Amino acid sequence: MAKTLYITDMDGTLLGADSKLSDVSARIISDLTRRGANITVATARTPATVEIILADAVTALPAIVMTGAAMWCRDSKSYVNTRYLAEDTYKQLMAKCEEYGVNPFRYTLCEGETMQVYHNGEMSAGEQEFVNNRLNLGLKNFNIDTPHGLLPYLPGVVFFFAMGDCERIFALADDIRTTVDCSVSCYVDIFGEKTGLLELFAPGVSKAEAVKQLAQDVEADRVVVFGDNLNDIPMMQVADVAIAVENALPEVKAIAHKVIGANTTDAVARFIEEDFGKIR
């Protein structure tokens, strides 16, 4: 029997407008997993928030986290396949960010499973809210305006994250794409259309590459991917079946094989339930 792998983005796709997993979706995913369905998530989030959001959902496969810079094994609470930025790349990215007046968050993972996040310089209201919403979650510590964060190089950096005015963030992303050997993910914040989000990784890092790796690991014959935003397009393009939710951006719907209900209607979980029933 053919094995199908289901991989869904979280915010704006699997999660509701409150950025939470509904009781209905959690129940469906847990039941299907116990019946043998291969379901997981691919997200820009770190395990610190993935663990909380998926607390009521049973999944057996590693979660693709940090846009593919690593996978997170929920049962063993450990990272696998982590990709780090090289020292030269780190220094080039810091120089480019400074040129554009952007103070990035730098996510490091050196020892154990607790991620250290560094930020130096003035923070906007949006950046402060971003930090405040993630304090005391476990698995991640924020280090704001510390001398260590001003070192020429921080070892163990997994990725840079920056947020700000769309025009500035997208211009920085375009510049980096042509001058620095790294992976760039840039998209509009679904919670504020004037805010651009930028993620910078080691070369070759993407949700798409992680999806292909996981599909190979589980020996999947068919991959079904769900998304809503620009950073989901690459992984949707490598899927056998690409599904967009109704609230997805036009660019995402344009490359999807099928458009289902909005993220507020448990559409992803219900689609998987129906599809898995057909292939059983």
Image: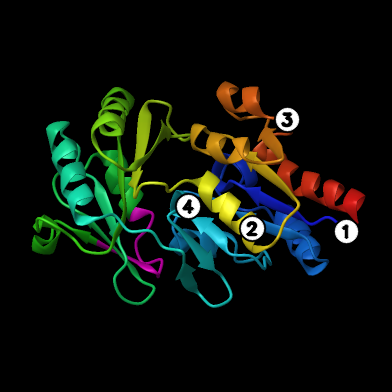
Element type at marker 1? loop
Do the residues bearing badges 3 and 2 touch, measured as CB atoms within 8 Å? no
Across and down, in percent, residue 268 comes to: 72, 44
* Label 3 vs 2, first from the N-terminus: 2
Quadrant of res 55: bottom right
Q: Which residue is mark 2?
A: 216
| CA distance for labels 3 and 4 | 23 Å
Mark whose residue sits in front, 3 or 2: 2
Q: In the rendered structure, which amino acid carries the disc numbered 2?
A: Gln
Across and down, in percent, residue 186 comes to: 39, 34
Q: Which residue is mark 3?
A: 257
Q: Which residue is mark 1?
A: 1
* Label 4 vs 2, first from the N-terminus: 4
Magenta stretch, residue numbers = 132-142
* Label 3 vs 4, first from the N-terminus: 4
| CA distance for labels 1 and 4 | 28 Å
Q: Which residue is mark 4?
A: 68
What secondary structure do most residues of the magenta stretch adopt?
A: loop
Element type at marker 3? loop
| CA distance for labels 3 and 1 | 23 Å
Q: In the rendered structure, which amino acid carries the disc numbered 3?
A: His
Q: Is residue 167 above or below residue 161?
A: above
Quadrant of res 138: bottom left
Q: Residues within 10 Å of mark 2 (few under 14, many from 20)?
A: few
Q: Residues within 10 Å of mark 4 (few under 14, many from 20)?
A: many
Q: Residue at x 64, y 26 (%)?
A: 255
The number of numbered discs placed on residues in the rendered structure image is: 4
Q: Is residue 40 above or below residue 198?
A: below
Element type at marker 2? helix
Q: Is residue 136 magenta?
A: yes
Q: Is residue 74 above or below residue 18?
A: below
Q: Which mark is residue 102?
A: none
